[in-house]
Amino acid sequence: MGMKKAGNVIDLQDQNLMHLLEIMRDHDDVSRQDLAEISGLSPAGVSKLVGLLIAKGIVYEDALVSRGRGRRAITLRINENAMYAVGVRFARHYVKCGLFNVKGELISSCYETLGTVSVQETVDVIQELIARTLEDSGDARERVVGIGISAPGPLLAREGKIALISNLPGWRDISLVHMIHRRFGIPTLIEHDANVSVLAERWFGKGKLSDNLVYIAAGRGVGAGILVNGSIYSGKSNVAGEIGHTTINYNGPVCDCGNKGCLEMYCSSLAFARQAKEIAAAKKPAGWPAASRLTAEAVFELAKAGDGEALELVRRAGRFMGIGVVNVINAYNPDMIILGDEMAQAGEPWLEAIKEVVRERVIEELRKETTIELSELEVEPAFLGAGTLVIKKVFENLSQLPTNALVSG
Ligand SMILES: [Zn+2]
């Protein structure tokens, strides 16, 4: 072996370095001894690796913590300002860009709506926001290690190309990564929005410590990021997780994808808004805005205020989503499912309807090992995950990072 690294092959030392960083990320106040116990590596091995991480400026020694019986240990911490990532969320109708530190904290951000579907204008907007973020980053600029982009899928992340974005014509075979890299000269990565979301939930959200985690983005489309035994399950062309196009009604209406009765035709935010407008037009319920001005959020608010008609709609969408969740549980046996994006704004009544269907349709033993939660990340996972993607890449290739490269002055 040796020479050039191929794809996902990580050498042993890098693997161990990354494992120690993951332990420090997931647990507070760990000492070298704790690291040895949790990782199973020898104390001497841990000392050597920690020395490397300190030399590279990624880890620093913190206070002495008393550990009983007079034992005192030095705790180790990840230097959250050791490096920064620019994260870009490229969504169908807007672009968000921000600077993230190693802890996933958002340092600055900017936003632009996309009024156009022209590829060149969209690329211009993305580049302008990245340029603004870099300009505003001050001293952090020299520690920006990469640009991560999350985009609606399916896309071919390996070649950095966006193969197809439904509702955004003209994006076939566009090499966004190469355009961005050429402009800024900073390593650039792109990934499916659902995949970076599950990463964000695993690193910084409720999915901490879960290695069999599914994040479901229930927005205008319905997609899932799937973590199997700690790794993203991406499929041959990186389009796995398109659960929105699994059939829940085999004789249902034809979907854009060619299948019939797809899940997202019943429970996406677009479907929800359409159903709500139909109710508004047909029944004109008291207290509802006119159908033409009705939004999904307005119906969520009505439901939360106890409006029966709105509550029924939210519960119905939840029950459809529940069928999708049942299928995910049976297919992947996750220990946790986190639901996010627009529909998750419907909150508890929606979640309860999902859980109700799961109780009805999944065998008890399997159901008991699956926690179902709403996302609680402060920064939306498809945005935070774009930054996380970059940090993860650096964590996986630590030996390539020059010693002291990241130590601040
Ligand atoms: Zn479909």
Image: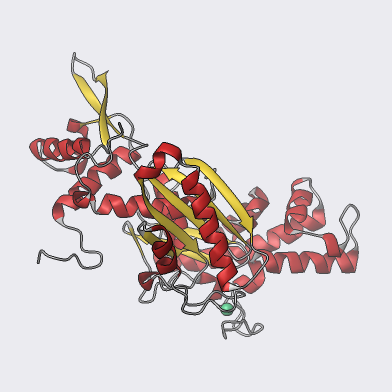
Question: Residue, x 64% and y 67% (percent of image)?
Answer: 267
Query: Does residue 16 appear left or right of residue 335 in this picture?
Result: left
Q: Nearer the viewer, residue 154 or 245?
A: 154
Split into 4 quadrants, where in the image is the C terminus? top left
Q: Nearer the viewer, residue 379 or 169?
A: 169
Residue 212, horizontal then vertical, whole percent: 37, 57
Query: Does residue 299 appear left or right of residue 336 in this picture?
Result: right
Residue 382, horizontal then vertical, whole percent: 51, 56
Q: Is residue 140 visible?
A: yes
Write down the quadrant of residue 5 in the picture: bottom left
Residue 314, horizontal then vertical, whole percent: 71, 58
Q: From this view, report whether residue 220 is shown above or below residue 381.
A: below
Q: Is residue 372 visible?
A: no
Residue 377, horizontal then vertical, whole percent: 52, 45
Label count reads 0
Question: Residue, x 21% and y 63% (percent of image)?
Answer: 9
Query: Does residue 57 appear left or right of residue 244 in this picture?
Result: left
Query: Does residue 88 appear left or right of residue 34 in this picture?
Result: right
Q: From this view, report whether residue 87 is shown above or below residue 105.
A: below
Split into 4 quadrants, where in the image is the N terminus? bottom left
Spot the residue most to the top.
70
Ligand 1 located in image quadrant: bottom right
Q: From this view, report whether residue 85 is shown above or below residue 175.
A: above
Q: Nearer the viewer, residue 166 or 227?
A: 166
Q: Nearer the viewer, residue 246 or 140?
A: 140
Describe the colour scheme in one phrase: secondary structure
Q: From this view, report whether residue 35 is shown above or below residue 67.
A: below
